Amino acid sequence: MAKKASKKKTAGKATPKKAAAGRPAAKKAAGKKAAAKKAPSDPATFMAELDHPLKAELEALMSIVMAADRSLVEGIKWNAPSYAKDGEDRITFNLGAQDRVRLVFHRGVAAGAARGKTQLISDVSGLLEWPAPDRAV
């Protein structure tokens, strides 16, 4: 005689929702919170908490930038030190790599009318890379 497969009743029991990657939704949400930890907006706090192998070099470069133009306003943008002049972003560090610190020189978003086919600055050294005429790295 064949037996019927019994169905377990789950009335009153909540089953965890599955996330797209197969993890329970609660674990995915916790992971998002950890990944979304926001960098401090204060440069001093940001630098105190920064864990980068070239932190000393970064601090030296930051001093050079500030000494070059005292009217620059220091801040944190894109999870790195950034400098603005008259409310326009001009220099932003890129700390994505562990073996280098990159400087991005740019005109800022409000300079759209000033953008053209000419380079932002004269690059006689040839040390800069130009992903666009208004941005040098």
Image: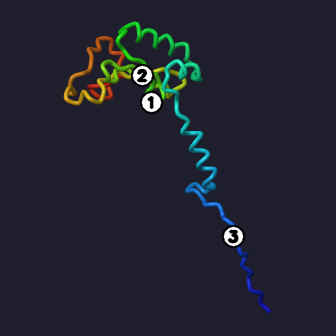
Point 52% across, 33% down: residue: 38
Point 47% across, 25% down: residue: 80
Residue 17 is left or right of residue 131, and the answer is right
**Looking at the picture, does residue 125 appear above or below residue 87?**
above
Task: Write down the residue under mark 2.
Answer: 82
For the view shown, which residue lies furthest in the right direction? 1
Residue 73 spot, x, y in % from top left: 39, 17
Q: Observer-nearest residue: 91 or 103?
A: 91
Contact flag, marks 1 and 2 (Cβ < 8 Å) = yes
Residue 80 is left or right of residue 129, and the answer is right
User: Which structural element holds mark 3?
Assistant: loop
Task: Write down the residue under mark 1.
Answer: 78
User: What's the distance in space between the residues labelled 2 and 3, CA to CA?
Assistant: 53 Å
User: For the residue marked with disc 3, what is the amino acid?
Assistant: Gly
User: What's the distance in space between the residues labelled 1 and 2, CA to CA?
Assistant: 8 Å
Q: Observer-nearest residue: 30 or 61?
A: 30
Number of numbered discs on residues: 3
User: For the residue marked with disc 1, what is the amino acid?
Assistant: Trp
User: For the residue marked with disc 2, what is the amino acid?
Assistant: Ser
Point 80% across, 92% down: residue: 1
Task: Write down the residue under mark 3.
Answer: 12
Rendered image quadrant of residue 93: top left
Looking at the rendered image, the disc whose residue lies closer to the viewer, 3 or 1, is: 3
Closer to the chain start, of discs 2 and 3, is: 3
Q: Observer-nearest residue: 72 or 94?
A: 72
Rendered image quadrant of residue 51: top right
Residue 121 spot, x, y in % from top left: 27, 16
User: Which structural element holds mark 2?
Assistant: strand
Contact flag, marks 3 and 1 (Cβ < 8 Å) = no
